[in-house]
Amino acid sequence: MVPFAVAPELLALAPLAIAAGVDLYLTLLFLGAAPVLEWWDVLPGALGDLNSTGVLVMVGTFYVLELMTEFLPSAALVWNAFHAIIRPVAGALLALLLLDGHPLSTVVPGAMVAGVIASVAHATRTGGGVLFWLDSKRVPNRLLVALLEDAAVLGMVVLALDLPAVALGLAGVVCVASLRVVGSQVRAFAFAVGLVWARFWLTLGQPRWTDPEAFPLWVRDALKGDVMAPGGGLRGSPAAGHRLPGAPRFAIGWVVVRGDTPLFVFRRRARTAEVDMGTLKAKGVAERTFFRRVEMGGAGSPNLYFPLDGPRQESLRAEFLVD
């Protein structure tokens, strides 16, 4: 005898939030079209309200637009950065529809949880694409990736409607399997959003290094007694490192120019850590629409990335001794 039963809507909450985070418009389009195609007579909660011609046309249009942007890395970056706000809000609203009729004490926490899950799913999925885009050495077939994502999202939504307990279990497996990469991919997504912001600020100022007075407090604390001494020539810039030795796969921090070799300073498990860039030899500096990349030598081809409002290409070449 089962001591208590969990409502199917609660079981379907996390799977639908993940699906919305990965591909919001396909999820809404499928849910809105399901009653029309008579796949399900009644959808859980008030999801049937999505069965509207206006809603279907709108989400279908946005689905096509999103698919088109994925083939243009710069457009995809701006689109996904903008959706850093839209995804959690949409996940919460989807939960409100799903949990319609439940007590307010269930609906409000459920909407908050769904918003967080959708946000993390969006950041993880987009961050993986950002890592490929930043690297530019391994570019997957975008059409194939889009088809695989769509198939996974549709499968998750179908399970959430038909077998919510199985869908919840699958969502748990996906989350556990993603634990190893989620940190780096979320950081990559956060850095990409910052690149869009830096591109905007570039129109209001000139690219430059940052003076020590403007360093974050945690960077200044990490440099005390080490590199703050060299006679006023200290400079730095926000940056990110991909596959740097001794750092996570993708780390966000600061590059500090000290008097000898540059230093990459970043946070790791609530503590600061450093990578001496003198151990790596820079091969070149490439400039793209949203960033500058310092390509380093060594195993795994590590790279450094700078926003466009940071140091100029010529300055990076000089500091990293690029021939």
Image: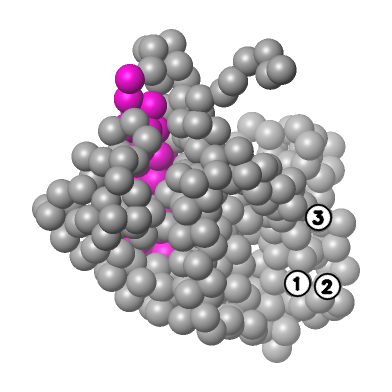
Disc 1 versus disc 3: distance between alpha carbons? 11 Å
Residue 219: percent from the left, percent from the top? 69, 40
Q: Residue at 22% of width from left, 39% of height from top?
A: 49
Q: Within the image, what quadrant is residue 86 found in?
A: top left
- Dot 1: what SS? loop
How would you classify the magenta stretch by its main secondary structure?
Answer: helix
**Of callouts 1 and 3, which one flags the residue occurring earlier in the amino acid sequence?**
3
Disc 3 versus disc 2: distance between alpha carbons? 14 Å
Could you tell whether 124 is left or right of 219 in the image?
Answer: left
Q: Within the image, what quadrant is residue 42 found in?
A: top left
* Residue at numbered disc 1: 302
Residue type, mark 2 in image? Leu
**Front residue (pair 176, 48):** 48
Image quadrant holding the N terminus, namely: top right
Residue 210 among magenta residues = no
Q: Residue at 68% of width from left, 34% of height from top?
A: 218
Residue type, mark 3 in image? Ala
* Residue at numbered disc 3: 247
**Of callouts 1 and 2, which one flags the residue occurring earlier in the amino acid sequence?**
2
Q: Is residue 6 visible?
A: yes
Which span of residues is magenta-colored? Answer: 77-101
Residue type, mark 1 in image? Pro
How many neighbours does mark 2 have within 10 angstroms: few (below 14), some (14-19), or many (20 or more)? some
Q: Which mark is residue 50?
A: none
